Each structure stands twice: as C-alpha cells, then as structure tokens.
C-alpha cells in the first residue's frame, strides 16, 4: 500500500487530499449508517487523522452532531491534518484535545477511530494508549478508518492497546494485518487508477463494480 501511495502521488499525480476526500466521504457514509446519536472523531496527525477530519466535515454538512478530539493540541497538527482542521474551524465544528474530552461520550455516542492507520511505527507511545483504552471502554458503535488503531497493518500484531471496532473501512487495498478483529470490514475506493497497480506489476481486478465500496469477508 505504501508503494501504491507513492506511485499514485509521485508518478501519476493524484494529490493526497484528493484521495483523502474520497476516504472521508465514504467513511462518513458508514458512520451515518451505524450512528444512533452524536459522533466523536478521534484523530491523530497523519493521513489517518486527516481522513477522520474530512469525515467530520462531511458529517457536519449533513447536520450530524459531530466533534473532534485530537491526540495533541490543535496547533501542533501539520500537513493535511492541519489543513482539514482549519476548514473545520471555519465551520465551527468543535475541535478539542486531551483524553478528558472523551469523558462525556455516552453509550450511544458513535466513535470514529482515526487515530493511527498503517503509519504506526514501534510500540504504541503515550498518549495514544490512553485514547485507545477510553475508546474501548465506550459502548456506542465504533468505526475504524483503514485499520483498528494499535495494530501493525502488515502483521496484525497488537503494538499496545487496540481498538475493537464494530466496522472498519479500509482504503484501496485490504492490509494483510486485517486478519484480526475488525468488525464488519469494508473496502473503499479512493480513486487509485489501475495504471498504478500495473506499474507495480500487481495483479489487480477492480473489485468495486458500480459501487464506491464493497464488503469483505474474512
Ligand atoms: N493514499 C493515501 O496515502 C491516503 C492515506 N490515508 C490514510 O493515511 C494513513 C497513512 O498515513 P500516515 O503515513 O501519515 O500515517 P498514520 O496516520 O497511519 O500514522 C501517523 C500517526 O500515528 C502516530 N503514531 C505513529 N507511531 C506511533 C506510536 N508508536 N505510538 C503512538 N502514535 C504513533 C503519529 O503520531 C501520527 O499521528 C493510512 O492508513 C490511511 O488511513 C487516507 O487518509 C487518504 C489517502
Ligand atoms: K484507525
């Protein structure tokens, strides 16, 4: 997947934000499908967090009560995540940080787990562990973006606390490490053209048909 992301950006010319828009929009559809009441997006500073912040925008656009809890002060975000957060500020979508911001999430609150995706490197460091254990304590529906935060996306090994979602929306290709508890697993089309797979000599038959995502059986 790293190679696919590299070739699509460097050689084919799609920008990360274009793919992130697809990820956030499809994730928002899945969140609307499971949610019972309010939604809290728990986001980190990488591409995974950026996808979560994009999802928050799409939810707010549909009048879903949504707020964002970051794993760091908002001013410490960088890159695509900072970009998405600036838009949320303009929309007056609440963005806070600190695990205590999750204290008032109740048993019906839907959690979007956009803390860490395939970029997890090494054992889980604080404060990510605290966010994951708080998410695990909550009883409302949880939807993970790409992989449940805390697993190694390649091996499935838990590198500390792990989110146990009801649903996982993984992007473009199923990661080999998804042979773990993911809840219902969906594969989302983030618009990677076939030529990217051809250039990497990967055998690829687009699985999406007429749809923007497909359910995967494990
Ligand atoms: N085509 C693409 O490249 C796209 C990627 N997207 C998402 O971006 C993800 C990959 O993005 P990145 O490479 O930025 O990485 P991630 O966003 O997966 O991970 C980086 C985040 O994890 C934290 N982190 C890393 N190691 C940690 C550790 N040991 N303990 C605690 N925190 C740790 C970092 O502080 C940072 O917040 C994918 O999983 C996917 O979900 C999508 O948003 C959009 C399209
Ligand atoms: K995640």
Image (cartoon, helix red, strand yellow):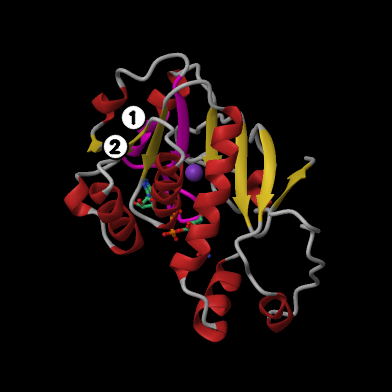
Q: Position of residue 12 (x, y in %)?
A: 57, 83
> How many discs mark residues in the rendered view?
2
Horizontal placement of 134 versus 189: left or right? left
What residue sits right under mark 2 in the picture? 127
Q: Can residue 130 be found in the magenta stretch? A: yes
How far across and how far down the image is residue 153, in percent? 57, 50
Determine whether label 1 and label 2 are within 8 Å by CB: yes
Q: Which residues are magenta?
A: 109-132
Q: Report x, y in % for residue 40.
A: 39, 31
Ligand 1 within 8 Å of disc 2? The answer is no
Quadrant occupied by the N terminus: bottom right
Query: Residue at point 40% right, 54% down?
Result: 50
At 32% from the left and 25% from the top, the residue drawn is 102
Residue 9 x/y as whole percent: 51, 77
| Element marked by disc 1 | helix
Q: Which residue is mark 1?
A: 130
């Amino acid at each position: 997947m790293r190679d696919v992301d590299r070739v699509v950006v460097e050689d084919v010319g799609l920008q990360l934000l274009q793919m992130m828009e697809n990820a956030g929009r499809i994730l928002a559809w899945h969140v609307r499908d499971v949610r019972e009441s309010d939604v809290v997006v728990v986001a980190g500073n990488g591409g995974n967090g950026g996808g979560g912040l994009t999802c928050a925008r799409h939810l707010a656009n549909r009048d879903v009560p949504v707020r964002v809890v970051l794993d760091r002060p908002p001013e410490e975000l960088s890159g695509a995540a900072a970009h998405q957060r600036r838009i949320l500020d303009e929309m007056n979508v609440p963005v806070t940080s600190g695990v205590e911001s999750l204290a008032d999430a109740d048993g019906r609150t839907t959690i979007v787990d956009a803390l860490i995706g395939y970029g997890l490197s090494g054992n889980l460091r604080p404060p990510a562990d605290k966010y994951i254990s708080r998410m695990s304590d909550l009883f409302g529906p949880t939807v993970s973006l790409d992989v449940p935060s805390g697993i190694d996306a390649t091996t499935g090994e838990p590198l500390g606390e792990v989110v146990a979602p009801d649903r996982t929306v993984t992007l473009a290709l199923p990661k080999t490490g998804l042979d773990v508890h993911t809840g219902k697993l969906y594969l989302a089309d983030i618009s990677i053209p076939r030529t990217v797979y051809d250039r990497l000599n990967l055998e690829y038959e687009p699985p999406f048909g007429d749809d923007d995502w497909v359910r995967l059986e494990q």
